[in-house]
Amino acid sequence: MRNVHKTEAKALLRQRMNAVSWLPAVGRLPKAGRSDDTMADRHARDRMMKAIRSYMSEEITAFQFDEALSEATAGTNDRTVQAVGRALWFHYDDCKDHRIVASKEEWDYFNRLLLLLASDGQFETVRTWREWHPLQGVAALLLAGFLLIAVRVGIGEHLWAYALPFGPPSMVLAWLNSRRRRKAAGPFENVLAPFPSLGSLRAARLRVAGFVRRRYPKAIARRRIREPVVEMLMWLPWSITWCMFSPVVLFFQMLPGRDSETRIRMPETRAGADAEPPSTQP
């Protein structure tokens, strides 16, 4: 039996994150960590590739896809497999069962994820750094304003009412942060993701010479999981919760952001080694 409370919370989180664009619909994979000591788990990758292909072919639905991804990531130390599983979490709904719903951009993203898994490439974090920008100062000023009110009126349940007006400014900050990150990423990120550069994409393509991209079926172009009115109603409780806890949100928004530079390392092929090529079946 599915965990209803867990899946409802995930659906609301996904809807709100899409609304304020904390994460692009198609973008970089979640941080995978250093992979110097991690070997590609061919078995786990094949299982994940099978799950993705079955979902794209409409052989399985969203619920079955969710279970297949969990099985593929369970018990593996392959960080790239784990990162791909986390990235796919935002591209299906685990509250309402459905066939694949994807834009052309998402479909191409799935194809590139399949290429990454087939290539045995591993994510490596080259460097990380903290990032400061003026919006963090705005968040700090808003939080200071709330704390000043709290000092004047005292601590108690009445503070919930005083926190509500700080919710909309916090949402605006989230939207501005999202727009700033999209501009910094450049116009080609959605075309290359999850690959950090055209060179890494080309290296994977050369390694998996027999890889076949799946064509986007026009029949799913207008497909939706829910009606727009239903989606809007699902946002309401999350928006109210955001406003009630806006001081907590502002606290995290004023902290320095963390960014990282990643690359994809391809395994070296030893001369004369009799090894089977990665799986490339469509």
Image (cartoon, rainbow, N blue to C red):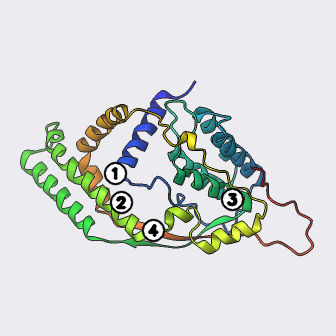
Image height of 27 relative to 56, above or below: below
Identify the amino acid type marked 2. Answer: Ser
Q: Position of residue 200 (x, y in %)?
A: 64, 71
Q: Which residue is mark 2?
A: 178
**Local SS, label 1:** helix
Identify the amino acid type marked 3. Answer: Leu
Classify residue 271 by image quadrant.
bottom right
Q: Disc 2 vs disc 4: Cβ atoms closer than 8 Å?
A: no
Give how far apart the Cα atoms at labels 3 and 1 are: 30 Å
Give how far apart the Cα atoms at labels 2 and 4 are: 14 Å
Upstream in the sequence, badge 3 or badge 4?
3
Give how far apart the Cα atoms at labels 2 and 3 are: 28 Å
Q: Which residue is mark 1?
A: 20
Upstream in the sequence, badge 2 or badge 1?
1
Can residue 211 be spotted in the picture? yes
Q: Which residue is mark 3?
A: 115
* Rendered residue at 16%/54% (across/down): 147
Crowd around label 4: few <14 · some 14–19 · many ≥20 (10 Å): few
Identify the amino acid type marked 4. Answer: Pro
Q: Which one is closest to the eye, mark 3 or mark 4?
A: 4
| Left-right relation of 110 to 117 | left
Crowd around label 2: few <14 · some 14–19 · many ≥20 (10 Å): some
**Local SS, label 3:** helix
Upstream in the sequence, badge 3 or badge 1?
1
Q: Disc 3 vs disc 1: Cβ atoms closer than 8 Å?
A: no
| Left-right relation of 130 to 195 | left
Q: Disc 1 vs disc 4: Cβ atoms closer than 8 Å?
A: no
Give how far apart the Cα atoms at labels 2 and 1 are: 7 Å
**Local SS, label 2:** helix
Q: Position of residue 8 (x, y in %)?
A: 44, 32
Identify the amino acid type marked 1. Answer: Val
Q: Which residue is mark 4?
A: 187
